[in-house]
Image (cartoon, rainbow, N blue to C red):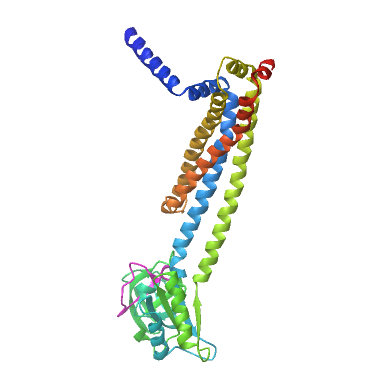
Amino acid sequence: MADERASDQSVESSLATRLARRFPAGSLAVRNLSRQRLRAGLAMLGIVIGVFAVITLGMLGTALQTAALAELGGLGNQVIISPDDGEENLGPREVQAIRQAAAGGGTVIPLNSGGASVSGPNGQSFAQLYGTTQPAALFAVDDVPDTLRQGVAVGDELAAGLGARVGSAVEIEGNRYRVLAIIDSEGTFSPIRPGSAVVLPPDEFVADDYAQVVVQADSADDARAIADGVRERLNTRQERVSVLSLTSVLSRITEFFALLNGFLLAVAGISLVVAGVSIFNVMLMTVSERRGEIGVLRAVGVHRDEVLRTLLVESTLLGVVGGALGAILGTAVVVGVALGTRLPLSAVLVPTNGLVVLGAFGFGMLIALGGGLYPAYRAAWEPPVESLRG
């Protein structure tokens, strides 16, 4: 056993010797930092805190923006056309013009509307009634059937108050309907309040005209084009319809999150700058204390480039180790927040957050390198005689 231990120690010693010969600056830097562990640890802690702050604030800001846009994306793609003042409903001609404007860019969903009292197994409540042949396209919920024939879809809030569920019967103005689906209002965006609505077949409404038309566009660009097309076709001579495109609202939200992320990153970046000042101070004190040692090295023939390289490697090592620890801790905290809250983990694991981690790590390294640049340059270019004098 003793022979094996001696053999292992000799192998490790030879390996360390070869690494020291191959990378002398790195070997000296590690040795120097190990001699000043407390001071080096405090300087590294500044980098850890700075990178941690940048990553947590940057990743959380990006995740919140991603989650919000994912939730509001369907709303931003909707165009809502309603009768203008003086008009009661939208007739077949207006609906046909809207279909022409939306051709190839979205789904046109005409809506009848009204209000009535709805009775269920456990109660009665007033609800807003909507009639459409395309409830699934309007609500974008999987359990809403494509067509409603002899049944209705009931919002989840209304269904809870009535005690209704899929298969139950509800009564509206003396007519009984079977509940075919419960609309999940959470994450569902539409011009109506889906939680307290009842969606019926349009044949159940007396009027043939429509109260409004919703266009579910394929993208935000399509929504803008459809809104412009509807205005050109129906509002050229007079204002016949009111066109509301929610894409502009979504754009404002995107701009707000961009400003918020920039502010958060700027605040976090201040901590990294403070960490750079800490490393600058540590390196400056280290150089001051080692003036005699550096003078001896220069006197025996060590070139100033080697001295400069060794000191820069020391500061870079502080940045690399501190940046890596800060990146790991920051990422772990953000993932933990996502797992412990309703923030989707998919909103955290996006490519943009990967760039945030790499950027924070690289910025931490640059700050550390910048903090050690002047002290290293000063030590390397000081005349050996002056260094030996102390």
Instruction: Name the one closer to the observer, 78 or 26.
Output: 26
- Count of numbered circles in the view: 0
- Residue 380, image x, y percentages: 61, 25
Q: Position of residue 325 (x, y in %)?
A: 49, 35
The N terminus: image quadrant: top left
Say if 22 sits above or below 256 in the image: above
> Where does the image place residue 390, in percent across and percent down from the top left?
69, 17
Task: Inspect this view and state whether residue 180 appears.
Answer: yes
Q: Does residue 283 show up magenta in the picture?
A: no
Q: Is residue 123 visible?
A: no
The quarter of the displayed image where residue 43 is located: top right
In the image, residue 208 sits, relative to residue 127, either above or below, namely below
128 or 68: nearer the viewer: 68
Whether residue 32 sits left or right of residue 335 in the image: it is right
List x then y, in percent, for residue 335. 45, 46
Q: Quadrant of residue 142?
A: bottom left
From the viewer's side, name the closer residue of 313 and 185. 313
* Residue 157 forms part of the magenta stretch: yes
Residue situated furthest top in the rendering: 2
Extent of the magenta region: 139-160
The residue depicted at 49 percent of the width and 90 percent of the height is 88
